[in-house]
Image: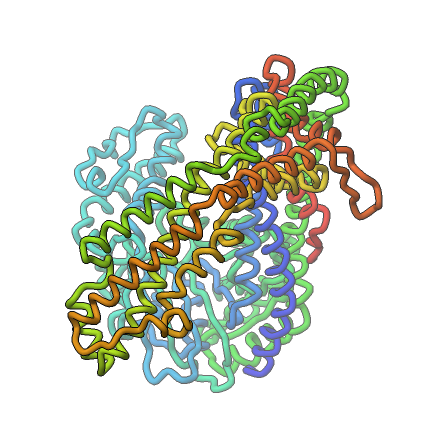
Amino acid sequence: MSSEKIQSIIQRRKPFAKTISDSQSSLDKILEQFIRLKGICSSALSDDSLATERETVTDIFRQFDTRKADDLQAGMTNIHRRLSRDTLNIAVIGLARQGKSRLLQSITGLSSDVIPDSDRSVCTGVRSDIINDPDASDTWAYVNFLSEEEFITNTVGRYFTELKRHKPGLSAPETLAEFRHFMLPDRETFTTQNIEDETRMRNYIGELRKLQAHLPEYQNYLGTGRSAKIPEAEIRRYVVQNDSVTGEEFFRHMAVESVEIHCRFPHEDAGALKLIDLPGLGDTRIGDTERMIEALGDQVDLVFFVTMPRSTGDDVFDRDINLYSQARRGLGRKLPIDRWSFWVINHNTKDDNLKQCEDFAATLRSKDIHVANTLIVDCKNDSEVSGKLIDPALNFLEANIERNDKEYAQSLQTMMNDTVGSLHDVLIEARKIFAGRDNFEKDSELLDRLFDAVWDDLTDGLAEAVESDSLLGRRQNEPCTELREQFNKTLELEEKAADDGKLENVTPETVRRMIRRAGSPEAAYTELMHQLRTDLDNKMQQDLDATLRSVVLLPMKKELCRILAENGRLNMYFKGEDILPEIIAFIEDGRAEVMPTVLDGLKKLDAAAISCQNRIQPLIRDSLNLLDPMKEESRQRRAILTNAEGLYTSLIEIYKDTLASLRENLDRDEIYSEPNEFAFSVAATFVDDMTRRSRYIASGDSIKLETQWRALYRYIRGDIWPEEFGSSQARAEAYAKISGPLQTAVTLCENMNYTFA
């Protein structure tokens, strides 16, 4: 043996594992996109008017066999696991009493307590994986139990499957609780047309009765996903069918799926070697042989068939041919079994069957049994097993592992080619369904005629909105009486409070606290002046700005939006109270390039803001100088302050004078004419932007405003004119939702590099 050789073999597989992993990731991405695409199509084509398209696409998608895709994904996962594992796996297969267990004992150093052997009856009842662990100080194992469902399906159910071939009306238990009290068929009266079948079926009934009768001995071990770690001394209890001396039967193994044994092999250079021991084939429960062999497909790198010819004379019998045929069916689906199997002929030195071993080896090929190598080995001799069997096996794997892996993956490569090719064909066929569905040219003549009428109404309505005799036009040069009223209202409230000897945020208690904190009445006076000035400034601005927005800006925007909604019929598509943000969002969603000027004008109107900061704010600030302790006017009015009461009285007096200054400076008609002028200018600019302005794009070409508006109506024509374009728009919108994901799936198929074998 050579741990370095084993490790070298394992590492040489890693690059191929990476290739498989990359292909699997690409496959997963494609299949995920296909699932997403089907969901998008189902949603986008849900309208009754698209029933034909929906049914057609559904039929096309059904052409892709998702079950084969699932099988491919599972196969890719298995082969990646095969190439990525950190052990070299050899399965040992043989009929009972042929020396298989003795061979395993020679390699692993385990005793018959762990790997039972017997010359008189069956012993091992479950699959055992034996892993070399050079660092192990003792032997231990994981026991993996069947779930109740697995037991009913794979054990009990297989017997009933066979029985029902002869008695189709026979029912089968579906749960463990049901099996516990199930009335099994009568063994003695069960008949078939063929006497051999009848004997076999009666034996099956006997096995079922045994399983049922001894259920209390193993039922507690059945459980979904259960496993247990056990010491070496307990392993025998979970793998043995019967005692080799007394013949007593055991049933705990009925609940076991497999046992994974960890131990240190006696050969120090055994490395990362794993042996898989199957029970003596032909002596296990019905279906166990096929199930265990199939499970080995992706887990084994080399198979040892073990046979021991009798010294009294032997031949390659049907039992050997059946053994080979079973393995070839289960293991040779992806790689011919002759490429990765050895036939080990057990040389029993005690009975001296060497001549019979040589005759057996010479006869194998004539019986159509083909393996990579045939070796005669004394399975009880540790050194002979190592030198004559394990070393040649490792040399074989070193020379052939990459070839075998590539050929093993070939069936998956074929499946991958078929799957990706089939999916690509389906996607291309689906894409044809939507070809021309968004054909605006087909609707252009009717659309042009209908749009022209709406365009006239829209432009006329916008133009009228900024004419001199319109509401906005008449108010253009009029003072904003609502703003003046709000100014007077705010000022009157402040004047009344001051006359009553009250300030909103400054009280006598506030003054006393400020004096204590500032250290003197003079310092407190300065701080309180700043506070009163700032509060009054903010209050005036907030009240006036709120009035400007509500009585000047918003009515202007609402009037323009009303014209867009009613004259332009855009309320047929945009249903919100304020359609301006809705139209902007709609254009920005992939349509800005064909409507740049319209989008720009709409955004300017939406962002337009009005404030008193331009003209009124300077006048307010000028009136507040008396409350600024740093200004000359304030210093000239400063009182001699000795206590809190005097300070508070002085603040009220100067606050009243400030309010009087505000009234004098702001109670003028010309101040309040500007807001309406501003609103009119915003509206006039918007009308120009929407009806007259040209826009040059990167190529230097201009897009006429009418053309841009026509593009907007073309997108939503089904809602604006439902009788004329409702169905065509539904198709167009469905295609818009589907085309991107569909093309993504096509591109993934076309760009995928899935050649790996």
Percent coordinates x, y for residue 283 in the rendering: 38, 53
Furthest residue toward front: 636
In-front residue for pair 429/120 = 429
Query: From what the image shows, is residue 178 above or below residue 619?
Result: above
Query: From what the image shows, is residue 627 above or below residue 543?
Result: below
Res 339 quadrant in image: bottom right
Q: State the residue at coordinates (57%, 71%).
A: 376
Query: From what the image shows, is residue 731 above or below residue 722?
Result: below
Q: Quadrant of the C terminus?
A: bottom right
Percent coordinates x, y for residue 465 in the rendering: 60, 27
* Left or right: residue 656 compared with residue 57: left
- Tell me if I can see residue 566 in this picture: yes
Percent coordinates x, y for residue 519 in the rendering: 22, 83
- Tell me if I can see residue 362 in this picture: no
Query: From what the image shows, is residue 326 above or below residue 657?
Result: above
Res 358 quadrant in image: bottom right
Q: Quadrant of the N terminus?
A: bottom right
Q: State the residue at coordinates (62%, 60%).
A: 22
* Left or right: residue 602 compared with residue 632: right
Furthest residue toward right: 700
Q: State the residue at coordinates (60%, 32%).
A: 61
Percent coordinates x, y for residue 295 in the rendering: 47, 54
